[in-house]
Amino acid sequence: MDSPTSPPPLLGSRSVSLTLACAVAFLFQLQAFAFAYGPDFRRLGASMQAPWLPTFIFVTSFVGAAFAVALWWRMRRWAVWGFLATTATQSLPFMVTGRLSPTMLVLPTLVGGAAAWNWARLR
């Protein structure tokens, strides 16, 4: 008698963990995009001697949101690397000035972990 075997994972099928991680990432990037020119980022840019910070946050949050959508919608590995590179780029000004908070690393860790968990499903 043969024992039943489990079917192989479906390539390209949606994963709940990756869907939730991408949704959270998209909402956080959308929030940063919306508040980029708000008083908080302007004040932070002035205190860091970086008047370009609001524009930098505006552009990188738009790119990060696009990578989050591409990761969820197309399930591509390049979208994972693009999102992680974008969030690393967003963290650079804060790391250089010593204002990098550990909470800033939660979002890329969440997306990277969900992508690693579902790596076989990504194309």
Image (cartoon, rainbow, N blue to C red):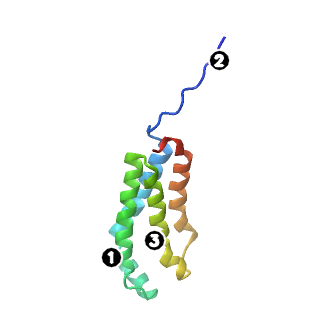
Q: Position of residue 98 (x, y in %)?
A: 56, 81
Between residue 3 and residue 51, name the one nearer to us: 3
Assign a secondary structure to mark 1: loop
The quadrant of the rendering that contains the C terminus is top left
The residue identified by callout 1 is 37
Residue under label 2: 3
Asked which secondary structure carries label 3, the reply is helix
| Secondary structure under the numbered disc 2 in the rendered image | loop
Sort mark 3 into few (<14), some (14-19) or many (20+) by Cα contacts within 10 Å: some
Q: Distance between the residues labelled 1 and 2?
A: 61 Å
Q: Which residue is drawn at 44% across and 54% down?
A: 78
Rounded to the nearest angstrom, the CA distance separating label 3 from label 1 is 15 Å
Q: What residue type is labelled 2?
A: Ser
Q: How far apart are marks 2 and 3 (CA)?
A: 51 Å
**Looking at the image, residue 106 lies above or below residue 52:** above
Residue at which label 3 appears? 90
Q: In this view, does 97 lie to the left or right of 49?
A: right
Whichever of labels 1 and 2 marks the residue nearer the N terminus, that label is: 2
Mark 1 and mark 2 in contact? Answer it, CB < 8 Å.
Answer: no
Which residue is drawn at the image coordinates 38% and 46% (left, top)?
74
Relative height, residue 1 to residue 108 (above, below): above
Q: How many marks?
A: 3
Q: Between tags 1 and 2, which lies in front?
A: 2
Identify the mark at residue 104; answer none if there is no mark.
Answer: none
Name the image quarter holding residue 59. Answer: bottom left
103 vs 38, left or right, is right
